[in-house]
Image (spheres, grey):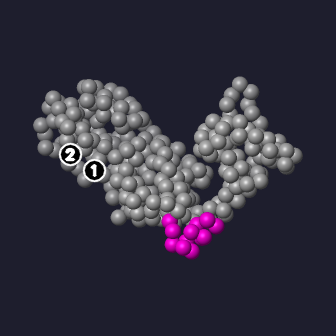
Amino acid sequence: MQIETLKIFCDLVETQSFSQAAERNFVTQSAVSQQVRGLEEKFRRRLLERVRGRREVHLTEAGETFLQTSRAVLAAYAQLEEQMNGLIGTVKGTVRVATVYSIGLYELPPVVRRFMELYPEAKIDLEYSRTTRVVRDILSGTVELGVVAYPEKKRGLTVVPLPGDRLVLICQISHPFAKRKKLQASDLHDQGFVLFERDIPTRRATDRILRSHGVSVRRVAEFDNIETIKRAVEVGFGVAIVPRPSVLDEQRSGQLAVVPLAEPEWTRTVGIIYRSDRALSSAARKFIELLAA
């Protein structure tokens, strides 16, 4: 039995998908099935049960035991590799990073490029997801680092604060707000808004700030994707409040008007999160250094 077999099994349980487990490990789906059958034959125990009519797989009691021990073995092996690489001063390995779209698309690319220039033998595996999923994947050990907006202190998580972003209002260039140099929160009362969905931290922060100023707005539409929000504003659905880095291109091209917000609380905090009980790889530590620089 090889380390790769343990990883395939863990990936299959995590993704609940033979095809995704195969893709992650650069093998075929049939190879994943063969690996699982081989494990079950070796230990004479059924490890997985398929749900008829569904794609999910469920762990048996033996499978749960095997999963937990496999994760421990993989973690120990990763630590061994890290220690051996450290002896020769080489930064190697893959850092799995999960982030939200508004950070990953607009703020991380320059850091990733710089990381690859400095450490050509290392790799950043970047995934995009909602904040709740990022936190869940960090706690489960699926990914090593998370980069999120409005990081919350949570048991088992370490938070490394990063420089925050100003939130700005965006509107069509023909909108009356487009000519304003700055807007007060009170100016936004009863405006038609294109909003992030309610469970997204930036939406919760926006709602909280507006309430604190006694401002209510009209909800025109809600989306979970910042690109969709920008396009909706561009075609005239309403105005929106978004992180400034996400609209620099549209501001330069004249696609959207970007107007600063006056109050100091219109700042989005950003942070790196990782599991407190796990030692970070040297590659992860170097990536954090670049992000925090």
Vertical side of 52 occupied by 12: above or below: below
The answer, for residue 152, to whether it is visible in the render is: no
In the displayed structure, 206 sits above or below 95; it is above
The region drawn magenta spans 80-91
Q: Position of residue 198 (x, y in %)?
A: 42, 37
- What secondary structure is found at the residue carrying circle 2? strand
Q: Position of residue 139 (x, y in %)?
A: 58, 53
Q: Amino acid at mark 1?
A: Arg
* Percent of width and height locating residue 260: 20, 45
Quarter in which the C terminus is drawn: bottom left
Q: Nearer the viewer, residue 220 or 286?
A: 286
* Magenta highlight: main SS: helix
Q: Measured from the top left, where is residue 63 in percent x and y?
A: 77, 46
Q: Amino acid at mark 2?
A: Pro
Identity of the residue drawn at 14% across and 32% down: 176
* Front residue (pair 49, 5): 5
Report which residue position mark 1 lands on: 166
Q: Indicate yes or no whether the magenta region holds residue 159.
A: no
Q: Is residue 239 left or right of residue 182?
A: right
Q: Which residue is mark 2?
A: 260
Q: Mark 2 and mark 1 in contact (Cβ < 8 Å)?
A: yes
Q: Secondary structure at mark 1?
A: strand
Q: Residue at x 80, y 44 (%)?
A: 38
- Dot 2 alpha-carbon crowd within 10 angstroms: few under 14, some 14 to 19, many 20 or more: some
The answer to whether residue 2 of the structure is visible from this angle is yes
Crowding around mark 1 (Cα neighbors within 10 Å: few <14, some 14 to 19, many 20+) is some
Residue at 70% from the left image edge and 55% from the top image edge: 3
Q: Is residue 108 left or right of residue 64?
A: left
Residue sitting at the far bottom = 87
What residue appears at the point 38 percent right and 54 percent down from the top-left corner? 113
What is the number of callouts on the image?
2
Q: Does residue 242 sit above or below 279 in this rendering?
A: above
